[in-house]
Amino acid sequence: MKYLLADAGFALEDIKTWSWGNRTAARANLTPEHLKFPVYNPFLHGDLKNDPLFPVQVWALARRQAANGPEA
């Protein structure tokens, strides 16, 4: 995500990215029997701790520099 925004003209130092996910959340959302958004059930889904090595959702905030240089 960060490098996609950098290719679009944002400076790397002006891009912040985060992610969240885990295998249980991915399985619950991508299993064919769940044609709608699944309802969280702690007995089936367990805890929802973030696994940084298995992101399901990624988001970013970026600030584009002004055409005449950095913003004051």
Image (cartoon, grey):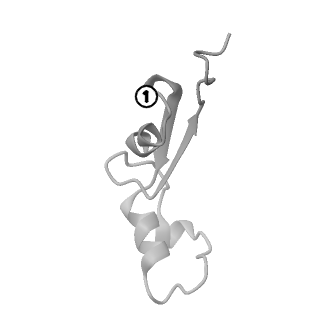
Rendered image quadrant of residue 3: top left
* Residue lying farthest to the left in this orientation: 53
In the displayed structure, 69 sits above or below 52; it is: above
Q: Which residue is mark 1?
A: 12
Drawn side of residue 56 relative to residue 68, left or right: left
* Residue lying farthest to the top in this orientation: 72
Point out residue 20 in the picture as x, y percentages from the top left corner: 48, 49
Point out residue 51 in the picture as x, y percentages from the top left corner: 38, 49
> Which of these two is toward me, 43 or 62?
62
> Which of these two is toward me, 62 or 41?
62
Q: Residue at x 44, y 77 (%)?
A: 30
The crowding category of the residue bearing disc 1, from other C-alpha atoms within 10 Å (few below 14, some 14 to 19, many at least 20), is some
Point out residue 61 in the picture as x, y percentages from the top left corner: 58, 37
Q: Residue at x 59, y 30 (%)?
A: 64
Rendered image quadrant of residue 42: bottom right
* Residue lying farthest to the front in this orientation: 68
Q: Residue at x 40, y 53 (%)?
A: 55
**Which quadrant would the C terminus be assigned to in this image?**
top right
> Which of these two is toward me, 71 or 59?
71
For the image shown, how many numbered marks are present on the structure? 1
In the displayed structure, 37 sits above or below 7; it is: below
Q: Residue at x 44, y 88 (%)?
A: 32
Please name the amino acid that badge 1 sits on: Leu
* Residue lying farthest to the right in this orientation: 72
Point out residue 52 in the picture as x, y percentages from the top left corner: 37, 45
Q: Dot 1 lies on which element?
A: helix
> Which of these two is toward me, 27 or 9?
9
